[in-house]
Amino acid sequence: MKRHYLSLLNELIELFPCVAILGVRQCGKTTLLKMLPDTWTIFDLETNSDFQLISNDPDLFLRLNAEFTAIDECQMMPYLFPALRAAIDSDREKTGRYIITGSSSPELLKNISESLAGRVAIIELAPFSLTEACEYSQSDFFKMILSGEKPKAFHDQLKPKVDISKIHEYWLRGGYPEPWIKNNPRFFKLWMQNYIKTYLDRDILKLFPGLNSGKYRMFIQMLSNLSGTIINYSTVARSLGVSQPTTRDYFQIAHGTFLWRSIPAYEKNAVKRIVKHPRGYLRDTGLLHFMLHQYTLNELLVHPSMGGSWEALVIENIIRGFNALGAQFDYYYYRTSAGAEIDLILEGEFGLLPIEIKYGQTVNSKELRGIKDFIRERDCPYGIVIHNDKKVTMIDEKLIGIPFAAI
């Protein structure tokens, strides 16, 4: 199944000596490497033979493998990065020499930024987006935003391409490639169970040997109930029986290992009192539903977490879509002390873009007062409401209604 990120990877190989592919475990990093031409050789640091081969003398290894070399799971060998910098600097102008991948390590970005700054491009890979899971090409939605299209263009050109039943299947199961491809309910449960166990018992304990594993295990279980909510660190700390700084560390680990996404509050140019606590989501809805024991669509649709789960699904697909194009942007959420809220705010070269997310097919105009005020107060070019309608609609001249099936 072709990934939307493949075009970006091929582009960056032509521009940089090294490309880093980062993402949560089992999201498809190794599979993406296998889509490279046969001229590339892949080494996996989770196999003893490849680990020994490289660890004996990283500098010599990189001299002998000076181009078309991909090293998988590089977080296993932190001392590889200085050697990689030296190898790149020996022929700085040559591009497309190395690809590295890594997962489950907040220290990975630190190592890359300290050792390979200016020498590496980074791709943040994620599990399947909706269109990837359905084997469709990427929606024009993302390129239209990046190119500065006017609201009328979305109305005229953007069409839904995914069936509503397929959307709900993807929402329930999430985007991890292996369970999606196997399409077996029993396999899904066993895979998720082992995935969480591997994450806790192997990855986290190996990367953070001083961590209180019992408390962190409790924290991971709490995340399923915290997903989609505004996070108050002191409340979580009291529930866990740990200090507030420790709780912040836990959230940083979960975010840095690509399991959780922390979304900061939008505080710029505030004209009203706003909530400043971050909001967060488990990044994959299949994992969320497994942890909440929601195995059928009917169970999901009546669960109190349904709204937050739907928002997480849409937000992740939007972020993944822009990441697959290599776009530079920041993301936030917005909530005033009076309760006005916007689920997602994007800021990039395209300007400031507020996005409201609704599950229903029709949206009450009263529910859109917050985003309309935000657009007016900050003179945004336009805003977007993501819903489950059958077609793109112009809610007003600066607000577009776009079905999730169209992105």
Image: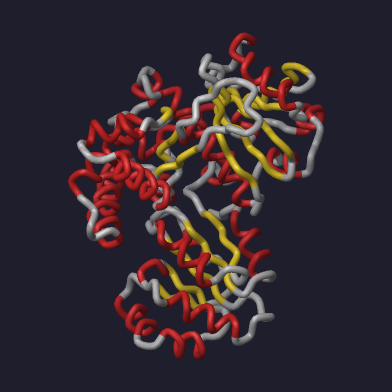
Q: Give how far across and how far down residue 288 sits, in percent.
A: 36, 36
Q: Quadrant of the C terminus?
A: top right
Give the vertical position of 213 relative to 269 (above or below).
below
At 73% from the left and 38% from the top, the residue drawn is 351
Count of marks placed on residues: 0
Q: Give the colour scheme shown.
A: secondary structure
90 relative to 294 in the view: left or right:
right
Q: Give how far across and how far down residue 214 sits, in percent.
A: 18, 46
Q: Give how far across and how far down residue 51 sits, in percent.
A: 34, 78
298 relative to 368 in the view: left or right:
left
To which quarter of the image does residue 14 belong? bottom right
Hey, which residue is sitting farthest left in the picture?
Answer: 214
247 relative to 131 in the view: left or right:
left
Give the vertical position of 133 relative to 85 (above or below).
above
At 69% from the left and 38% from the top, the residue drawn is 141
Name the foreground residue: 401 vs 136. 401
Name the foreground residue: 379 vs 158. 379
Asked whether residue 30 is in view, the answer is no
Name the foreground residue: 138 vs 72. 72
Q: Give how far across and how far down residue 390 sits, in percent.
A: 64, 22
Name the foreground residue: 285 vs 213. 213
At 36% from the left and 79% from the top, the residue drawn is 50
Asked whether residue 241 is in view, the answer is yes
